[in-house]
Image: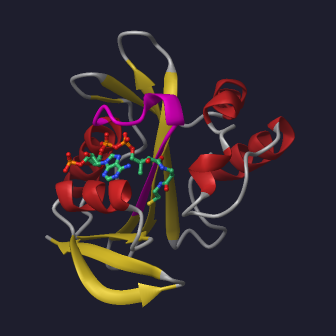
Amino acid sequence: MTSLELIQTARLFLEPLRTEHAGEMLDVLSDDRLYRFIGGQPPTYAELVDQYTRQVVGHSADCSERWLNWIVREAETQAATGYVQATVDSEPAVAAVAWVIGTRHQGRGYATEAATAMVAWLRADGVGRVMADVHPEHHASNAVARRLGLAPTGEIVDGELRWAYDA
Ligand SMILES: CC(C)(COP(=O)(O)OP(=O)(O)OC[C@H]1O[C@@H](n2cnc3c(N)ncnc32)[C@H](O)[C@@H]1OP(=O)(O)O)[C@@H](O)C(=O)NCCC(=O)NCCS
């Protein structure tokens, strides 16, 4: 099991999450429209620090789950643009993945590029099944799942369609 690493793509850096990312991510996550399909609302600074402090532990209390989070940074401008994340069950290694890109950085292929790199990293780390739950009407997110090679399973979980790929 590899520890979380910096991942580089053609245009992006995926930086392992640190609590100090809360300041710059506050602005990225501040648009109400980001929450239309995933629920919730823009976090306050204190909420984000609290959330990141829990997430950077990197695993559940019983160590049965790994929590892997990367901030997505645009290489050219060094701007934080969003995040990708994976929750990995250890036996067998199954990853539930998700992606968020801030509104003003959307439509440039960043979610696809970042999530593709994350999934490649997960596979190299031994993950077999990759899953994502996506609202059926969220066309952009469905397109990202398809680009990753996931396929709709037909299973609905909390109103979302489960996509999956088995290595
Ligand atoms: C889903 C999300 C991450 C996509 O980010 P993005 O960087 O704009 O995505 P990409 O640029 O990689 O585009 C992915 C695909 O969506 C398509 N797309 C983008 N916006 C679209 C829209 N409004 N309607 C339909 N398709 C759209 C793109 O054309 C692309 O498809 P293609 O590869 O077949 O051309 C972003 O909209 C987001 O963060 N939304 C809010 C959070 C969220 O719902 N996350 C999903 C949780 S699983």
Question: Which residues are drawn in magenta?
Answer: 97-109
- Can I make out residue 27 in this image? yes
Q: Nearer the viewer, residue 160 or 71?
A: 160
Q: Quadrant of the N terminus?
A: bottom left
Q: At which x and y percent is residue 61?
A: 67, 68
Kindly identify the residue that appears in the image at 52 percent across and 36 percent down.
103
Q: Is residue 54 magenta?
A: no
Q: At which x and y percent is residue 72?
A: 44, 32
> Looking at the image, is 144 positioned above or below residue 156?
above
How is the protein colored in the picture?
Answer: secondary structure
- Circle count: 0
Residue furthest right in the image: 46
> Looking at the image, is 163 positioned above or below residue 56?
below
- Can I make out residue 70 in this image? no
Kindly identify the residue that appears in the image at 72 percent across and 25 percent down.
23
Residue furthest bottom in the image: 155
Q: At which x and y percent is residue 149?
A: 15, 62
Q: Quadrant of the C terminus?
A: bottom left
Q: Is residue 99 magenta?
A: yes
Q: Specify the quadrant of the image occupied by residue 52.
A: top right
Q: Nearer the viewer, residue 66 or 79?
A: 79
Kindly identify the residue that appears in the image at 76 percent across and 45 percent down.
43
Q: Is 109 situated left or right of 57 in this image?
A: left
Q: At which x and y percent is residue 109?
A: 28, 36
Kindly identify the residue that appears in the image at 50 percent across and 17 percent down.
79
Q: Nearer the viewer, residue 102 or 25?
A: 102
Q: Is 25 situated left or right of 165 in this image?
A: right
Residue furthest top in the image: 77
